[in-house]
Structure formats: structure tokens, C-alpha cells
Image: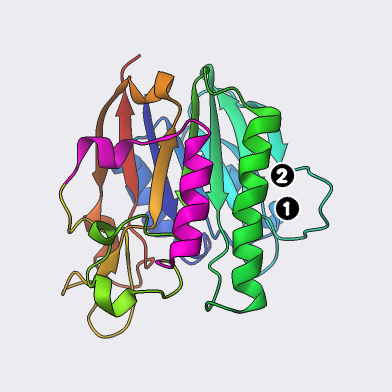
Amino acid sequence: MKIATWNVNSIRARMERLREWLVAQTPDVLCLQETKVEDDLFPALELESLGYRVAAYGQKTYHGVAVLARLPLDDIVRGLGDGVEDAQARFLVVRVGGVRVGSLYVPNGQAVGTDKFAYKLAWLQRLRAWLFAHADAGQPLVLCGDFNVAPEDRDVHDPEAWRDQVMCHPDERAALAEVRRWGLVDVFRRLNPDPGRYTWWDYRQLSFPKNRGLRIDHILCTERMAARCRSVAIDRDARKGQAPSDHAPVIAEFAD
């Protein structure tokens, strides 16, 4: 099973790119983030014409997540469902081919010390609570998405420049580590220990050609799935060309 994740930074702006990428890569499951569209305007019919079933959880202009799959989708969960009043569409979990797959868009946090940063830390705590309440670490589970956290200095092009900044702050790294401690493996890092591999590059200052990036898009799996993982790659080519997303897809392949 090939499972991928991609923050497309507006599905309507990247639809042609997405269509070409799906035809070229043929993932079995693709998790999307920052779709930035309400569910009734999501381009489901066009994606279905390519052989994908669609589950979407979106809103106008901001945020939004989706899962595309070649196999039937069921057991669809939209939102963390913890009773917290939160209109932001950031969390979608489905079951496909006997595997629970989640598409997540963790809040960016804007700047350390702001209300948005506090919301980010609280959201990660809510995610950890969801895992304890609704998931089983002994079962196949894959959480994919833009986590907006570079877990370690080797995930950052210039650790000193990013020291204590949003996406690299010790508090959010600790919060993500607590999520993983529930029983999740960063399969990219397990198979690719070397630094210098990133998934996001700022549009400004020639960040992409200079490879001044961060690794903030992750595929986290329970050990039962991680043991099946044969490869994980970042598709830098999808970040090239005219009007790309600022993120590159991450692709993991799992043995059946």
C-alpha cells in the first residue's frame, strides 16, 4: 500500500498539479491539507474520475483536510470530537483497506507567546487525548499531515537561526513527542537518518533552490504499520515549476 501526504495550499489553485501527480504516482491513499474549500465545493467528481474515492472536511478560505483512496472509505471521523468548540477543519480519519488513516493539519502557531501558539500546543494535547480515547496502539494506524513542527535540529536547514522560533520551539517539539509517545513511529526518520531532507520551503529568498527548508510534514504510524514500511521519500519534484505549493509530498510504501 502506498500512502502519501501533501499540503497542497489550496486544492483549487493546485488542481492541475494534483491531477498530474496522481496519474504519475498512483498512491493508494493520499492525505491532503490546506484544501481551503467547503465540502460542497470540493472537486470530488474530478478526483473520482481518476479512480479515487473522497472524504473531505473543509471550510472556506482556510485549513481543510481530505483523504483520497482507491479502496472504499468507511468509519469516517471529522474533527476531534472532544466537546471543545472549534470551527477549524483540521482532523479527518477514515478506514481504508483495514488501516485507519488520518489527515491532520496542525495549527501553525504564528509566533511564540501568542494566542495562536497556545492554541497549537492545546491542539496537540487534544490530539494525544484523542489517541488514548479512540485509537489502539496495537492496531494499524497511520497519521499523515502537516504537523507544523520540525522535531529535531536535523530537520532544520539552520538550527541556530530557527532556535526558539515557531515550528522549532522546545514546547511544540515536546508536545509532538508526547503525541508520539502514545505509540507512533516517525517512519521517515526510521528509514532516513541523515539531515538535510525537508518538506517545506518558504516562497521567499530562493529558499527552495538553496534548500533552506524544514521537515514539518510527517507520516506517523503504530509499530504494526511501521514494521511493514519499506520506504519513505520526499517528492521534491512536486515543489518545482510554476505556482507550486510550498510543501512537497511525502510518500510511504507498506508491504501488504
Circle 2: is it few (<14), some (14-19), or many (20+) Cα within 10 Å?
many
Give the magenta-colored segment's residue range.
168-193
* Callout 1 amino acid: Asp
> Would you identify the image quadrant in which residue 116 lies?
bottom right
Determine whether 161 is above or below 184 in the image: below
Residue at 23% over, 73% down:
158
* Horizontal relation, residue 22 to residue 92: left or right: left
* Residue kind at label 2, given as amino acid type: Leu
- Residue carrying label 2: 80
Q: Position of residue 178 (x, y in %)?
A: 52, 45
Which residue corresponds to mark 1?
40
* Rendered-image quadrant of the C terminus: top left
Which quarter of the rendered picture does the N terminus lie within?
Answer: top left
Q: Residue at x 69, y 66 (%)?
A: 60
Q: Nearer the viewer, mark 2 or mark 1?
A: 2
User: In the depicted view, which residue is nearer to us: 88 or 172?
Assistant: 172
Q: What residue do we see at 58% from left, 78% from top? A: 113
Residues 87 and 193: in front is: 193
